[in-house]
Image (cartoon, helix red, strand yellow):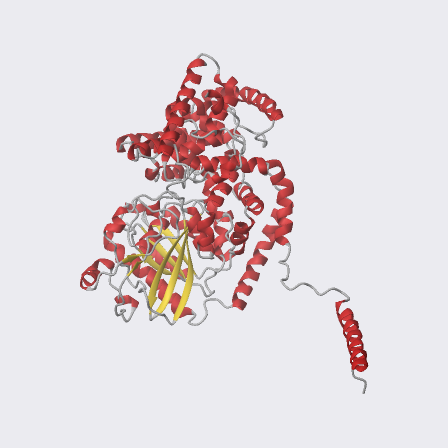
Amino acid sequence: MNSSFSEPNTPLREGLGEKWQTASCSDIGKDVFKSESCPLARAKFTALRHKREAIDRFLKKHKNENLAIYIEELRDFAISPGGLVDDEFRAIIWPILSSNLVNNDDLDDVSSSYDSDFESAQSDFDETPVQDQFHEVELTREDLMNHKEWHQVELDVNRTLARFPPNITDVHREILQNELIPMIVRVLSANPRFNYYQGFHDICLTVLLVCGLKDALPVCINLAKNGSFNNYLLKTLEKSVVRELDLLYVILSRVEPQLEKVMRSVELGTMFALSWPLTWFSHSLQKYQQIVRFFDCLLASSPLLPIYLSSAIVVYRRASILSCEREMPFIHRLLTEMPRELPIDAIIKDAVYLSKLIPPCLLKTRYLNEYRKFVSKPPRTSVKAIPRYALQFMFVAGTVGAAAGFLFFKQINPM
Amino acid sequence: MSTQDSTSPTVIQAPKPLPAQFVTAKHPDEETTATQAAPQQLERVPYPVATTPTVPQEVIVAPKKMALAPSANKNYKQKRTFKVIIVGDAGVGKTCLSFRFCCGKFPEHTEATIGVDFRERSCVIENELLKVQLWDTAGQERYRQSIVAHYYRNVNATVFVYDVTNRESFQSLNAWIRECEKHGLTSDSNSPRILIGNKCDLENGQEKVSMDEAQIFADQNNMALFETSAKSQSEADHVESIFLTLLHKLQQSKPMHVQTVDERQKSEQDRLILKASEAAKLEEEGFCC
C-alpha cells in the first residue's frame, strides 16, 4: 500500500477524465456519513484513511531523524491525492517543505532529484544564518508598529473574518488576528526591500492556522525569501505576477485552443486570476480544506505550479465559460467566483500533468515566443487569396472551351 | 471571494407603472407593501455559475425588490450599458458602496479586494433599460499602476471614494485624479465624475474631513460631492439616490450614443500616446520570473 502512495505522481491521461472527485478529505468524510449508500465515496474515504495511516507510520518511523532527508517522500505525500490529509501532519511537514522549496523549474526527471537534493542542502546552509539573524534582531512591537506597512496589514487582517474556518470561536479568532499582524510585519522586515501586497496576508493567515504562531513565522519567511512570493514582494506586480499570468494563455492555446480563442476575443485579460497566484488561491477558494490541500501541493512543487493550477481550473470551467455571455465582464465575474465544490485532487493532477506536457523552461521561452507571434499575426482572411495566374488561366480556358464548342457544334450541324 | 460577496441576482417583478422620475423612486423597504398586493411572480435570475450558491440564505428568504428593476417581459425602446469605475484608497469602503448599490444591502464581511471585482445592476429609467457595470478596484498603491490601469478603458463615469474619518484617504484623492487623467478621464471629458465621502456615520473628532473643505475640493475638480455611509440603514436611500443621480446624468449626457466609434478611437489614441513612453520602457526588459 505504501508503494501506491509514494509512487511518483505520473501524469496520466485518465487524470483529465476524472472530473468528479470530491474536494478533500474531511469533505469526503462528511459526505460518506451523509450518503452511506455511495460506494465510490466510501472507497475514497477508505483510501484517505489508509493514506493517513501511512503518513502516520512514516512520521513515527522517522521521528528521531531529520525529516528533510526524506523530502522526496514528503513531496509525494503532499502532491498525491488527498495531500497531507490532516492538519496535524501539515503542522509537522509544512515547515520541512517550506525550508526545502523546489526552486528549479523541472518537476520531473531523474537528474532533478539530485539537483534538488543539492539545492536543499544548499538552502539548509542558507537557512541557518537567516534564523540566526532573525533571532539577533529581535524586533519589539513598537519597532514593528513603525514599519511602513503596519497600517495596511492591520487593515487587511481585520477584514479576514470570512477566511476563518467555522470551528474557530470569535475570541480565538481575535487572538489569532492580533498575532497575525506583527507576524506579517516581521516577515516583511526580513528584507527591507520587501513591499507588502494585499493578499500576502492570506498566505500568512493560512500558514498560521495550520502551523501555529511559533512555526508559522519561519515558514512564512521561507516562503517570502525563496518561494514565488519573493518575486511578488520585490518587484512590481506588473513585472512579476502579471507576466506569469500571461503564460496562462500560452498553456491554454496549446491544450484548449477554442477556449483560448474565446477568452482572447473578448479581451478578458488575466486579471480574473490575479489573486490565484498571489494568494495561492486562498483568497478565492471557499473552503478551508480546499485551501490547505492546494497549499500542500504548492509547497512541494515548482514555483510556476500556481499558473498550471490556474490553467487547470480554467479548463475545468470550460463549459461554463463557453456557455457564458461573450462579454468580458461576465466571463471575468464567472471566473473570479470560484465554485464551492471543486474536484481539487483532479485539478492538481491535471496541473501536474500540464506542467510535464508543457514544461516551465519551454513555456517561458519558446512557447511564449511562438504564442506572441501567433497572436500578433493578423487573422487570416476567410476568402482564399486568388492564385497569381488564375485569371489568365480562366480566360485562356474559357476561350479554348468556346472555340472547341463552336467547332464541335459546327461539325454536328453544318450550316 | 465568497458567494455572498457577489452580485445578488436582480429580482424580476411583475410589470408596474414606473415612477415618472427617478427621484421619486422609493426605497425597496417602502415598496414591500406594493409587492404583497401584486401577484407574487418573484423569480430569481440564476447566475451563469455552474454551482448552486449555498451561503446567502437570507437573500432567498427575503428577496428585496430593487428600485427601478426591469420587468420580465417588456420591450424597452433602448438598451444601454454604462461602465463605472470606483477608485479610492484601501479600506475606504469601495466594495461596500458598490455592494450596497448593486445588492441593496451592506455586506457582512468584506475582504481586501485583489485586482478588480465586477458587479452589475439593471435599471429602467424613462422606458430605457440601463445596465450599470460597476468595477470595484483594489485600493492599495501597488495595484494602482499595473492592475487598475487596465480598467480605465471605455469608462463612462468615475466614482472617487474617500473615508471622512481618514484624512489621508482624502489627501490621496489628488493622486487618484491624476491617475485617471493619465488615462483620459479628465474633468472636461464626457464622463462624469463624482466624489463620495463614505463612513459619515462614524464619529472621529478632529480627524474628520469637514464637508466644507471636501466641497471646495470637489468644486475645484468639477465633481459632485456626496457624504454618505454604506453601512447605516438610514443612509441606504442616500447611496441609492447618489448612484441613480449618476445614472441619470449618464443617461442625459449623451442621449443617443454612449460612445461612437470615432470617439472611442480618439480616446484610444490619446491613451496610446500616453502609454507609449511606458510601453517603450517595458519592451526593453525581457521576460524573467
* Horizontal side of residue A182 vs B188, given as left or right: left
Which quarter of the image is occupied by the N terminus of chain A? Answer: top left
Q: From the viewer's side, name the closer residue of B89 and A84.
A: A84
| Residue B94 or residue B15, whichever sits in front | B15
Which percent across, then down, holds residue B256? Answer: 44, 72
Residue at the extreme bottom of the image, as rendered:
A415
Give the residue displayed 48% in from the left and 66% down from the top. B259
The x and y percentages for residue A350 are: 50, 37
Residue B108 in the image: above or below residue B83: above
Work out which residue is located at the far top of the displayed protein and give it.
Answer: A64
Vertical side of B205 occupied by A179: above or below: above
* Residue A217 horizontal/vertical position (percent): 42, 26
Whether residue A148 is visible, yes or no, is: no
Q: Nearer the viewer, residue B98 or B172?
A: B98
Residue for point 33% across, 71% down: B126
* Residue A151 in view in this figure: yes
Q: How many marks?
A: 0
Query: Looking at the picture, how far across and down is residue B268, in whole percent?
Result: 55, 61
